Amino acid sequence: MVTDLVRQQLAAACHRLAAEGLLIGTAGNVSVRDGDRVAVTATGAVLGELTVDQVVEVDLDGNLVGGSLQPTSEVYLHLSIYGTYDVAAVVHTHAPVSTAASISLGEIPVVHYQQLLLGGAVRVAPYATFGTPQLATRVVAALEGRAAALMANHGSVAIGATLDKAVENALLLEWLCTVYRDALAMGKPATLSRKQQEDVIAAAIARNYGTVQQAPQEGQA
């Protein structure tokens, strides 16, 4: 059974994503896996105002096992991702710049080192009707080795080992799409070579990049 804390965290994540402009009205959906159960937003819910009662629970086959509302129409997408990858949360949005990128681009090449946090070049899953197994299959393929992908003429999806990480990945993807859009307007964007990407990864590992660290104490190297 999904705990009340998980439901509260899911609602809070939706509120944050809406405040950041990534979730608009009822468009988009978010889920968290808790063992063999998945907490997911209800279809038709205004996500910026989501209540814990609008978080429903399904099993890994998509059967409703908790709550009185119907799950999002994209529940099959979420379950397909959980069935393929070892992740704890999925965020699907119609964020404006990410959605525009999904309409206009075939992929986003590696143009900034922070993009490597998403796994590299961002793929665009070919278009398929929302809520269909075909869409789920295509998005799962686009996510291979990645923490985010675009969905052609639709939006974006981000995944993470925690709900907070999935939210951060969704925010990073929208930032990246914005930067790439602006770079295209200024000229031909430069991309990072494979060697440059490998150097970034090595430096990040050596420096524990992205983590809060204590400064050396006086007298320590």
Image: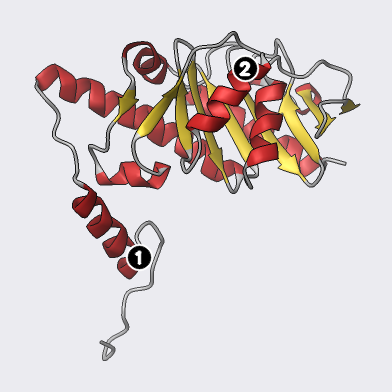
Considering every residue shown, the one lying at the far bottom of the view is: 219
Q: Nearer the viewer, mark 2 or mark 1?
A: 2
Q: Is residue 211 above or below residue 133?
A: below
Quote the CA–CA distance across marks 2 and 1.
37 Å
Query: Is residue 9 among what the camera can see?
Result: no
Q: Pinpoint residue 108: horizontal percent, then vertical percent.
A: 31, 28
Q: Is residue 86 left or right of residue 180?
A: right
Name the image quarter holding the C terminus: bottom left
Residue pointed to by mark 1 = 205
SS at badge 1: helix
Q: Is residue 160 left or right of residue 100?
A: right
Q: Which mark is residue 134?
A: 2
Tag 1: residue type?
Answer: Ile
* Foreground residue among 164 and 51: 164
Q: Earlier in the sequence, mark 2 or mark 1?
A: 2
Q: Is residue 18 left or right of residue 88?
A: left
SS at badge 2: helix
Instruction: Tell me, yes or no, whether the two marked residues, 2 and 1, touch with CB atoms within 8 Å.
Output: no
- At a point 77% along the width and 28% down the height, the residue shown is 52
Q: Is residue 39 above or below residue 34?
A: above
Query: Is residue 119 among what the camera can see?
Result: yes
Q: Residues within 10 Å of mark 2 (few under 14, many from 20)?
A: some
Q: Which mark is residue 100?
A: none
* Foreground residue among 172 and 19: 172
- At a point 52% along the width and 21% down the height, the residue shown is 93
Q: Pinpoint residue 107: horizontal percent, then vertical percent.
A: 33, 25
* Foreground residue among 142 and 179: 142
